[in-house]
Structures are given as structure tokens and as C-alpha cells.
Image (spheres, rainbow, N blue to C red):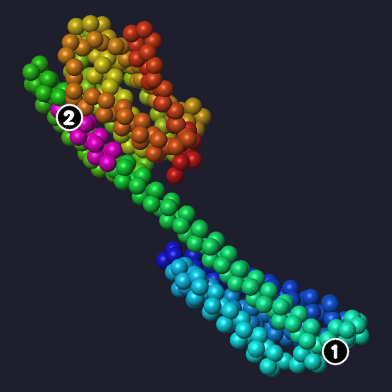
Amino acid sequence: MTDRKTRLYIDLAQILLWLSVFMAFAVAFFFLSGNMNPSIWISMKSSVQSLFFPFVIYLINYYILIPRCFYAGKRGLFLLLNLAIIVLIIFVQLLFSSPAQAFEEARIEEAFEGFSIWKFLIGVVVIRILLYLCVIGLALGMKYMIRWFEERKNLEEERRRNTEAELNWLKNQLNPHFLFNTLNNISSLVQIDADKAQESIAQLSDLLRYALYESNCSKVKASDEVAFMRNYIDLMSLRCSDKTRVEVRFDDFDDSVQISPLLFISLVENAFKHGASAHLDSFVKMEMGMDGDDVIFSCENSIVPKKTQDYSGSGVGLENLRRRLELLYPGRHSFDSFTEGEIYVVVVRIKNVRSDE
């Protein structure tokens, strides 16, 4: 349907173009032929006679010769057919018009001594050939311009599909990663407190429902994402000992603020994974709020040395987040991470979320 509308608009634009040329010719005939005392109808008739054959050549080239010959690589046939059409049209014009009468009425011989009717006739033929060649060039230019816009549109559409495919792949990669880490927490909790483990399984069902269904949306309310993260942080905190201090400061967001789902969950996972310790004093601190029309998420955690390397999705979450930010908010985000002594800090800013559709 969109392609049909586009082609209809293009055809209407070409009709308006030729109507404009027609009116310009009519006005020119009316004002430049003062000796003939022309009426409006005579001017319009002259315009029709002057533009009829150029219009025919334009239509033949635009709809037939250019698509079927020029774009098909048959350039020689394209030139030959156009030459035959031009010769035929000039022959018909000379056959049904009176060049000698026009020569006499214009009084060219009186104005230019020695200027014969044959020179006049050759001049008329040359001018018409140049005019028709210009019309063919106009048809080629229009075709090239429309083709360029169509190719650009197709390229943008292909890029959009590739971006959507990659985002879906990243989401599908994130969900198993999120589930894997959560099940690890519950598995550890079973050995410590079976009752809490049972409660956390019910909590996990709410998390999975959000992760599986809400994540299919391109945007969710920031308030819903905050509720999901609070739930997830509570579940992660069950595994922490008294040595780990967890601070969460999330602002209240109105419904106009929307972000992509599961955007910051990797930072939450990373903070608990590397910042929580069962034997050493440690902390995890997260904040999320608005700065004008921008959303800012910051996360700080202590750096706890690990005795053994943990390969449970190591590095997957953060690389996933970086790539999603590049695809979802190109030129509208910042991702800063740095270390201050024994503290790891990450700050993510997403710009203009209120105006984001």
C-alpha cells in the first residue's frame, strides 16, 4: 500500500510539473505574440501544440524505454528507438504544418538578408531535436532521482530489519543469562534457608513473567522497569550476608518516561556478582532518576577479590548492554565506567526519553 501511494504521489508530481510548463508556455505566447493579438484560447492552443510531442516522448521514455531498455543494459536499442521516435515526430510535424507559410509570416527573409527557407527549416529541426533530447534527459533524471530515493529507502528498511534482528538476538541472549544467575542465587539459598528459597521461587515467577512478556515491547514505563529491578534486587539480596550493604535509591517516574526493557539488569547483576562478599565488608549502591529529560542510572560496588573465576555469563551482560545502547539510542546515550580505589562505578545516561516514542 505504501509503494502504491508513493508511486501515485510521483505521478501527480509529474502531472503538476507538466501543467506548470504548459501554463508557462501559454503565458509566454500571450505576452510575446503582441502583433497577432492572441486570445487566451489561442495561447493555450499554441501551448498544447508545442508541448504535445515532448510530453509523448517523456511518457514513452519514462514508462517504457528507460525501464525496459536503459536499465536492462540495452543502451544501443534505447538510443536507436529514441532516434526513430524523434525522426518520426519531426516528419509528422513537417508533414502537417506549413514551414513555408511560417517562414513568410515571420518575415525572416526581410530581417536577415540571404536567410533562405532551407536554413529556417534546418534551424527548426535542430531546435526540436535539442528540445526532445532535453525531454529525454529530463525523463532519465526523474527516473534516476526516484530510483535513488527508492534504493535509499530500501537500504534504510534493510538496516532497520537488521537492527531489530540483532536486538532480538541480544534479548534472547539476555534472558537465559538473567535466568542462569537467578537460579544460581536460589540454588545457594536452598542450602542456607529453605523457607526463603521457597518464597524466592514465587518471586522469581513474577520476574520471569516480566522478562518473557514485557521484554517483547520496544518500550516500557520506567516505573514498571523500576518495580522489576527492585524485585530482582530483593531476590539478589537474599544471598548476601550481613557483610554486604545494599543501598537503592530509585526516583518515582511518571508515565511519560519510557525506556527499553531489561536495560540496566546487567549492571545490577554485575554489581552483586563482583561487589558482594560473605566474609568481607562490601557494598552495592544503585541510583536512578531524572536530570531534565534524561534518565541517569548509576551503580557503585566494592571490588571483592574472587578466589576462583566465575564463568556464569562472565562479560556477556555488559557487552550486551553496550551494544543495545548503541542500537537503541545512537548519539543519545553515554556509558562511563571507571575504578576509584577499591570501588567500581558505572554511570549510564539516556537523553530525551520524554520525547522518545
- Residue topped by disc 2: 180
250 and 306: which is toward the camera: 306
Residue 289: name its quadrant: top left
Residue at position x 72%, y 92% in the image? 97
Does 14 lie within the magenta span? no
Q: Quadrant of the C terminus?
A: top left
Which quarter of the figure has residue 205? top left
| Residue at the extreme front | 114
Measured as percent of width and height from the top left, residue 237 is found at 22, 19
Q: Amino acid at mark 2?
A: Phe
Q: Relative to residue 190, is residue 10 depicted above or below?
A: below
Name the residue beneath numbered marker 1: 105
Q: Is residue 226 visible?
A: no
Which portion, as a residue range, is magenta? Answer: 169-183
x and y percentages locating residue 190 in the rendered image: 9, 21
Q: Residue at x 79, y 83 (%)?
A: 119
Rendering quarter of residue 58:
bottom right
Q: Amino acid at mark 1?
A: Glu
- Crowding at dot 1, Cα within 10 Å, few <14 / some 14-19 / many 20+, comes out as few
Q: Earlier in the sequence, mark 1 or mark 2?
A: 1
Q: Please say whether residue 352 is visible from this viewpoint.
A: yes
Q: Position of residue 295 (x, y in %)?
A: 44, 30
Q: Is residue 166 left or right of residue 17?
A: left
Asked whether 174 falls inside the magenta stretch, the response is yes
Total numbered labels placed on residues in the image: 2
Closer to the camera in the image, 49 or 251: 49
